[in-house]
Amino acid sequence: MIVTTTDGVPGREVAEILGLVRGSTVRAKHIGSDIVAALRNLVGGEVREYAALLAGAREQAHDRMVEQARALGADAVVAVRMETSTIQQGASEVLFYGTAVRLAPAS
Protein backbone atom coordinates (compact mmCIF):
# COMPACT_ATOMS: atom_id res chain seq x y z
CA MET A 1 0.00 0.00 0.00
CA ILE A 2 1.42 3.35 -1.03
CA VAL A 3 0.77 6.04 1.59
CA THR A 4 1.73 9.61 0.75
CA THR A 5 1.05 13.15 1.90
CA THR A 6 1.04 14.39 -1.71
CA ASP A 7 -2.12 14.67 -3.80
CA GLY A 8 -1.01 11.87 -6.10
CA VAL A 9 1.64 9.23 -6.63
CA PRO A 10 4.53 10.48 -8.79
CA GLY A 11 4.61 8.68 -12.11
CA ARG A 12 1.20 7.08 -11.60
CA GLU A 13 -2.26 8.19 -12.62
CA VAL A 14 -5.24 7.94 -10.29
CA ALA A 15 -7.87 5.79 -12.02
CA GLU A 16 -10.55 5.97 -9.33
CA ILE A 17 -11.16 7.80 -6.07
CA LEU A 18 -12.63 5.41 -3.53
CA GLY A 19 -13.25 7.89 -0.73
CA LEU A 20 -12.10 9.10 2.63
CA VAL A 21 -10.38 6.62 4.92
CA ARG A 22 -9.35 7.18 8.49
CA GLY A 23 -7.89 5.44 11.47
CA SER A 24 -7.80 6.63 15.04
CA THR A 25 -6.98 5.54 18.53
CA VAL A 26 -7.29 7.10 21.97
CA ARG A 27 -4.59 6.37 24.50
CA ALA A 28 -4.42 7.23 28.19
CA LYS A 29 -1.39 7.64 30.38
CA HIS A 30 -0.60 5.06 33.05
CA ILE A 31 -0.10 6.20 36.65
CA GLY A 32 3.32 4.48 36.75
CA SER A 33 4.41 6.40 33.66
CA ASP A 34 3.19 9.63 35.25
CA ILE A 35 5.42 9.10 38.27
CA VAL A 36 8.49 8.38 36.14
CA ALA A 37 7.66 11.35 33.88
CA ALA A 38 7.36 13.65 36.88
CA LEU A 39 10.83 12.58 38.02
CA ARG A 40 12.24 13.17 34.51
CA ASN A 41 10.75 16.66 34.56
CA LEU A 42 12.98 17.45 37.52
CA VAL A 43 16.18 16.62 35.65
CA GLY A 44 15.08 17.28 32.08
CA GLY A 45 15.37 15.15 28.98
CA GLU A 46 13.05 13.07 26.86
CA VAL A 47 10.08 11.48 28.58
CA ARG A 48 10.55 8.08 26.93
CA GLU A 49 7.41 6.57 28.45
CA TYR A 50 5.18 9.16 26.75
CA ALA A 51 7.21 9.07 23.53
CA ALA A 52 6.69 5.29 23.34
CA LEU A 53 2.98 5.65 24.12
CA LEU A 54 2.47 8.17 21.33
CA ALA A 55 4.62 6.24 18.85
CA GLY A 56 2.42 3.19 19.41
CA ALA A 57 -0.72 5.28 19.03
CA ARG A 58 0.52 6.76 15.73
CA GLU A 59 1.38 3.31 14.39
CA GLN A 60 -2.02 1.88 15.35
CA ALA A 61 -3.97 4.81 13.86
CA HIS A 62 -1.92 4.57 10.62
CA ASP A 63 -2.49 0.81 10.41
CA ARG A 64 -6.25 1.25 10.90
CA MET A 65 -6.39 3.78 8.06
CA VAL A 66 -4.48 1.40 5.76
CA GLU A 67 -6.80 -1.50 6.73
CA GLN A 68 -9.83 0.59 5.78
CA ALA A 69 -8.22 1.47 2.43
CA ARG A 70 -7.44 -2.20 1.72
CA ALA A 71 -11.06 -3.11 2.46
CA LEU A 72 -12.10 -0.67 -0.28
CA GLY A 73 -9.64 -2.22 -2.75
CA ALA A 74 -7.27 0.74 -2.79
CA ASP A 75 -3.72 0.71 -4.13
CA ALA A 76 -2.77 3.91 -2.34
CA VAL A 77 -3.86 6.54 0.15
CA VAL A 78 -3.03 10.08 -0.93
CA ALA A 79 -3.23 13.47 0.79
CA VAL A 80 -2.64 11.80 4.17
CA ARG A 81 -2.78 13.96 7.28
CA MET A 82 -2.29 13.26 10.96
CA GLU A 83 -3.88 15.11 13.86
CA THR A 84 -3.71 14.77 17.60
CA SER A 85 -6.07 16.13 20.20
CA THR A 86 -6.52 15.94 23.92
CA ILE A 87 -9.73 14.15 24.89
CA GLN A 88 -9.34 14.78 28.59
CA GLN A 89 -6.42 15.31 30.91
CA GLY A 90 -4.22 12.27 30.44
CA ALA A 91 -5.87 10.94 27.26
CA SER A 92 -5.11 11.84 23.65
CA GLU A 93 -6.50 10.86 20.27
CA VAL A 94 -4.32 10.28 17.22
CA LEU A 95 -6.12 10.43 13.86
CA PHE A 96 -4.81 9.64 10.37
CA TYR A 97 -6.95 10.36 7.32
CA GLY A 98 -6.57 10.51 3.57
CA THR A 99 -8.13 9.65 0.23
CA ALA A 100 -8.14 6.00 -0.85
CA VAL A 101 -7.47 5.62 -4.58
CA ARG A 102 -7.07 2.94 -7.20
CA LEU A 103 -4.12 3.59 -9.50
CA ALA A 104 -4.08 3.07 -13.25
CA PRO A 105 -1.72 0.30 -14.38
CA ALA A 106 1.86 1.46 -14.76
CA SER A 107 2.80 2.11 -18.36
Image (cartoon, rainbow, N blue to C red):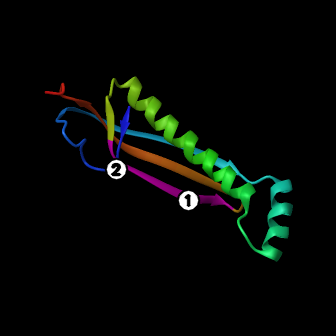
Q: Amino acid at mark 2?
A: Thr
Query: Which residue sits at x=18%, y=39%?
Result: 11
Query: Which residue sits at x=35%, y=45%?
Result: 4
Is residue 15 found inside the magenta-colored segment of the image?
Answer: no
Question: In this view of the protein, which residue sits in the foreground, 41 or 68?
Answer: 41
Query: Which residue sits at x=79%, y=64%?
Result: 37
**Relative to 74, residue 89 above or below:** below
Question: In this view of the protein, which residue sits in the foreground, 102 or 87?
Answer: 102
Mark 1, residue position:
85
**For this view, does 2 lie left or right of residue 104?**
right
Q: Which mark is residue 22?
A: none
CA gap, disc 2 to disc 1?
20 Å
Q: Label 2: how many residues lie within 10 Å, few (<14), some (14-19) or many (20+)?
A: some
Q: Quadrant of residue 77?
A: top left
Mark 2, residue position:
5
**Relative to 90, residue 66 above or below:** above
Quarter the C terminus occupies: top left
